[in-house]
Amino acid sequence: MNLPTNAVSRIAWAISFAACVAIPSISQANNSWNDYHWARMSTSTPIPLQVVDSTTAFWDNELNDSLNMWNISDVFNMAITSADDSRRARKQCKMVSGQMRVCNASYGFNGWLGLASINIDSNSHITQGTAKMNDSYSSYWEDPAEKNHVMCQEIGHVLGLDHTSEDGSSQQTCMDYSSDPNSQWPNQHDYDTLMAMYDHADGYNSYATGSASSAVGNSRNFGLGHRVHKTDHMEVWIETQADGSATVHYVYLAY
């Protein structure tokens, strides 16, 4: 499905507005990312989202632990169904239709630690996504808690979640922007938000239901399109694709 002509401008406005809304407290916050979510035909079973593992052994534990923690939610049942940790695959980190790909590589000293990218259709449904960890900032990864925090957060973005805070305060979730060692994993609020986001049927599945999906496009480290929002800790960029869809990039900045 193609986006209407003014879709990108509407998306940019919505992201800018949502990002400027104050989040008063964890009990009141809804950290849905602009209502982006994977489409599903039925709510009777968790979404069996397939994961392409393009991480080296240095990140394998963090990937597996993060998937397990997000799977505590009743919404997702993610599983690694294919793997390619070659240097080329990790550097390119190409999106795979209907799946999530997780990668690590030395992407350069470009200012970001983690980068989550989602492709959305005209209904704002996620059709594919990537989560990338930047090994160039090796000093950050000496702290296991920081590795867990960033890996968990980038996956959370690909599921459709936004931050719970951007001011450095801790809500004891990986979706905040704190250095609290208790902020390594999702919390109950994240699970509740996912339940609220995915409490309806969409009429079709935007995730892969078989094994025939193929890698498409190139989730790049540069040329991310147009920046539509920036804070001290994060940026949001939008780039249009040849098929009329849009890719939204959530950038976790080094600090």
Image (cartoon, helix red, strand yellow):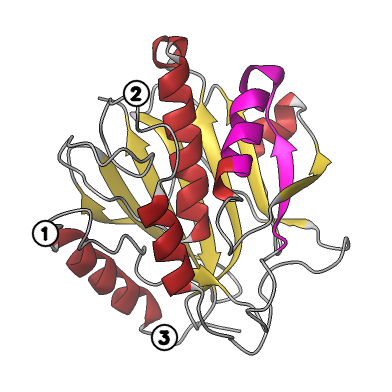
Q: Nearer the viewer, mark 1 or mark 2?
A: 2
Which amino acid lies under the numbered mark 1 shown in the image of this protein?
Ala
**Residue 115 seen in render:** no
Q: Secondary structure at mark 3?
A: loop
Badge 3: few (under 14), some or many (20 or more) residues near its Cα, within 10 Å? few
Secondary structure beneath disc 1?
Answer: loop
Which amino acid type is marked by label 3?
A: Thr
What residue sits right under mark 3 in the picture?
5
Q: Disc 1 versus disc 3: distance between alpha carbons?
A: 30 Å
Q: Quadrant of the N terminus?
A: bottom right
Residue at 31% across, 27% down: 254
Q: Is residue 81 left or right of residue 105?
A: right
How far across and down, in percent of the image, does residue 217 sit?
65, 55
Image quadrant where residue 169 sits = top left
Pair 3/2: label in front: 2
Q: Which range of residues does the magenta coloring cover?
A: 48-68
**Residue 181 badge:** 2
Quadrant assignment, res 222? top left
Q: Earlier in the sequence, mark 1 or mark 3?
A: 3
